[in-house]
Image (spheres, grey):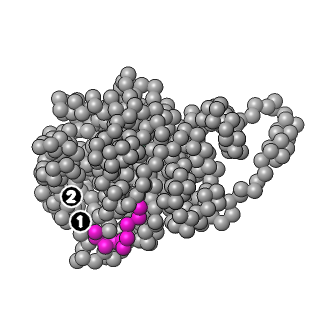
């Protein structure tokens, strides 16, 4: 029941021999085959995958870029996947036939013309990871970790989740013929995420605790039962999530943006994107590093406080509370990895209020794109970073939108009905009303609909029409 790397070469599939290893981020000791808890056997810290083979063929980054581009024309599942297309920088399974893929990745990079106007940043983009098969960025990591779970022969996979990890894990487990166990905080995840886990056939346990309590319990469970842990403590997840950054740079023709902004919860995603940036820079795929910044909700601001109060040396845990339930996390597992990449890229860390999240989410909706509340912290955070002078109007900025609009319909409906962010915040910020479009109930008559049309025309001028869209 180990998850060790295999050294066999499968010549029929063209898979590479595995040369990756697990390195502790605390004491730097190397573990060839970690235990089920994916912790360093010496100091208990998290592990990270490194591989001396991750270097450009013949030292030429251009040939790697061409190889990845050419694969976009091929029709094999492994090439259609926007994760495995970049397999030279991933831990490879012993055979490509083991790969569990739902054709994840390949997500769009959108321009944000409305938000460009409101922020004054001409070159503002959103990389929408919510356009993945189960509606969140988790799929990019899950395809890699589920593949390695299948290779290791596990019958059960498991995760603690605020909803998206569980939806993704349940889907990939179903595809691979594995059983899945989901631990979620009762009443604290959206129905749409819960319903995904149910439909994909997971054993779904709603625990009377928060996310941090679910994760603690899971870490005990994996020491006792032969279940494979699929939280982002699992370093294979981080490897797959690197590809969002690789694909983003490819979409920019390898000309790095100045800033990449991500939401922060358990801090696996920021760690993954930062790791990818550093690896791409080392390999000569990019000539300079974008600054990676992490944004948290004010009520779940463990990283903000960790940096502010200890300079990133000691975790400051918090009792998390926010309506952006995906990032309602107070004790982030990957905080040290996140601190490291933030410092290495010169990024920043900010917190935003519930009202700022609601407004930013509505703005992204008004772009015709939409996202879930946790993703909207990126736009809200950008506005703060601009005010503080950390981001400048002439710079190129990419927001990583992590989850689909359809992930949290309750939040969206409550916002349009005027119930979010709450009476006091509503009174303070009347501008929010211009984003609200509550449904109207009418008699089923032509007159009633015509009158509604006239009322809408008077109250909302169409001055915000998007004119020059040119998505990449
Ligand atoms: N955005 C969304 C939509 C998420 O679902 C999450 C995390 C994050 C941002 C934060 O990413 O944890 O890597 O810093 N969701 C996890 C889950 C915790 O269980 O679905 P992170």
The residue located at (30%, 33%) in the rendering is: 215
Disc 2 within 8 angstroms of ligand 1 (CB)? no
Count of numbered labels shown in the rendering: 2
Which secondary structure lies at badge 1?
Answer: loop
Instruction: Specify whether 188 is left or right of 222.
Output: right
Instruction: Specify whether 138 is left or right of 156.
Output: right
Q: Quadrant of residue 426?
A: top right
Is residue 365 visible in the rendered structure shown here? no
Q: Is residue 183 above or below residue 342?
A: above
Residue at the top extreme of this rendering = 208
Residue interval drawn in magenta: 282-291
Image quarter hosting the N terminus: top left
Residue 346 picture location, percent across and down:
38, 60
Marking on residue 176: none
Which secondary structure lies at badge 2?
Answer: strand
Q: Is residue 68 above or below residue 130?
A: below
> Looking at the image, which is closer to me, 312 or 162?
312
Q: Which residue is mark 2?
A: 50
The residue located at (31%, 73%) in the rendering is: 284
Is residue 359 visible in the rendered structure shown here? yes
Instruction: Specify whether 213 is left or right of 151.
Output: right
Instruction: Specify whether 84 is left or right of 195.
Output: left
Q: Does the magenta segment cover residue 236? A: no
Q: Which residue is mark 1?
A: 54
Q: Quadrant of residue 188?
A: top left
Q: Which secondary structure class fits the magenta region best?
A: loop
User: In the rendered structure, are the residues bearing label 2 and label 1 in contact, judged by CB atoms less than 8 Å apart?
Assistant: yes
Residue 342 picture location, percent across and down:
36, 55
Residue at the right extreme of this rendering = 447
């Amino acid at each position: 029941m180990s998850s060790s790397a295999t050294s066999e070469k499968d010549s029929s599939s063209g898979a590479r021999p595995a040369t990756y290893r697990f390195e502790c981020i605390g004491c730097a000791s190397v573990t060839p085959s970690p235990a089920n808890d994916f912790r360093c056997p010496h100091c208990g810290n998290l592990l990270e995958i490194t591989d001396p083979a991750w270097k450009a063929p013949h030292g030429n980054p251009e040939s790697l870029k061409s190889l990845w581009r050419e694969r976009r024309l091929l029709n094999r599942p492994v090439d259609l996947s926007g994760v495995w297309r970049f397999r030279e920088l991933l831990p490879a399974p012993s055979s490509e036939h083991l790969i569990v893929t739902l054709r994840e990745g390949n997500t769009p990079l959108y321009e944000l013309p409305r938000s460009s106007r409101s922020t004054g940043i001409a070159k503002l983009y959103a990389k929408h990871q919510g356009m993945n098969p189960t509606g969140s960025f988790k799929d990019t990591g899950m395809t890699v970790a589920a593949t390695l779970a299948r290779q290791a022969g596990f019958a059960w996979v498991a995760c603690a989740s605020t909803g998206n990890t569980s939806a993704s894990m349940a889907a990939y487990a179903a595809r691979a013929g594995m059983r899945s166990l989901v631990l979620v905080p009762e009443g604290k995840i959206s129905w749409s995420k819960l319903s995904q886990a149910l439909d994909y056939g997971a054993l779904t346990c709603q625990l009377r605790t928060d996310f941090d309590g679910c994760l603690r319990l899971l870490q005990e469970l994996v020491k006792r039962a032969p279940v494979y842990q699929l939280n982002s403590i699992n370093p294979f997840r981080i490897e797959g999530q690197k590809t969002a950054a690789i694909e983003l740079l490819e979409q920019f023709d390898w000309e790095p943006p100045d800033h990449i902004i991500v939401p922060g919860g358990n801090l696996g995603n920021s760690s993954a994107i930062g790791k990818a940036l550093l690896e791409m820079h080392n390999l000569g795929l990019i000539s300079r590093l974008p600054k990676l910044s992490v944004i948290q909700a004010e009520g779940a601001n463990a990283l903000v406080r960790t940096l502010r109060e200890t300079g990133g040396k000691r975790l400051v845990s918090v009792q998390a509370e926010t309506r952006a339930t995906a990032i309602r996390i107070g004790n982030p597992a990957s905080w040290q990895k996140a601190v490291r990449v933030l410092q290495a890229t010169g990024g920043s860390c900010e917190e935003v209020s519930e009202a700022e999240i609601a407004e930013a989410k509505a703005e992204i909706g008004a772009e015709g794109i939409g996202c879930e509340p946790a993703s909207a912290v990126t736009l809200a955070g950008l506005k703060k970073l601009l005010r503080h002078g950390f981001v400048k109007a002439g710079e190129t900025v990419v927001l990583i939108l992590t989850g689909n609009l359809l992930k949290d319909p309750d939040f969206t409906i409550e916002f349009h009905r005027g119930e979010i962010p709450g009476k006091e915040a509503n009174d303070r910020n009347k501008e929010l009303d211009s984003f609200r479009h509550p449904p109207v109930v009418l008699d089923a008559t032509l007159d009633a609909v015509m009158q509604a049309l006239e009322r809408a025309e008077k109250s909302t001028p169409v001055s915000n029409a998007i004119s020059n869209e040119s998505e990449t």
